[in-house]
Amino acid sequence: METKIADCAKMLAKHQLSVAFVESATAGWLCSEFALTEQSGKILKGGIVCYDAALKESLLGVPHDVIERFTPESQEVTDELAQRLGRLIAADIYVAVTGLTTPGGSETAEKPVGTMFVSAVIKGRLVSRRFNFEGPCEQVIKLTIKAAAELLMQETAALS
């Protein structure tokens, strides 16, 4: 388990905050890292994997035109996912992840493989980040998980 995840889970439990995930590129790995923490029963509400763009529309309700205009792997779509997850799972924090871990998606010169998007709605406030990681798929996912935990820790600390 990523050390940052353990630290993040402790911080969320200390602040009595619950979390839910909607993941595309990380395919549930982020949620399962939180499930391995001692605090999982106190903080983790659940997660949804919507790897295929059609699920982003049908399950989460992201408008088709938003996906078409910005691509399934974009900050705009990731923001939508984080903002819409509360319709399916009740939690204090909603985290969404999309991105490009391998070739074959919406990569461009401006958005190469390794570009990852993390959005979080924390007590009703949206926070969005774009990351550019290098390396094979597994490395990009691990770095994204660490970055998501760091983001949650920074934003949770700001609540104090």
Image (tube, rainbow, N blue to C red):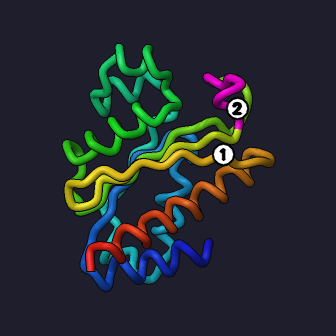
Is 111 left or right of 68, judged from the image as shown?
right
Mark found first going from the N terminus, 1 or 2: 2
Which region of the structure is painted magenta? 106-113
User: In this picture, is 12 found above or below 32?
Assistant: below
Q: Locate residue 137: give its quadrant.
A: top right
User: In this picture, is 18 found above or below 52?
Assistant: below
Numbered circle sitting on residue 105: none
Of residues 59 and 115, which is closer to you in this image? 115
Q: Locate residue 41: give its quadrant.
A: bottom left
Q: Which residue is mark 1?
A: 132
User: In this picture, is 11 found above or below 27?
Assistant: below
In the rendered image, residue 10, in percent from the top left (x then y), is placed at 41, 83
In the rendered image, residue 141, in percent from the top left (x then y), is placed at 65, 52
- x 57%, y 59%: residue: 145
Is 32 left or right of 103, judged from the image as shown?
left
What is the magenta segment's predominant secondary structure?
loop
In the rendered image, residue 125, in percent from the top left (x then y), is placed at 25, 54
Q: Which residue is mark 2?
A: 112
- x 40%, y 32%: residue: 76
Q: Are marks 1 and 2 in contact (CB under 8 Å)?
A: yes
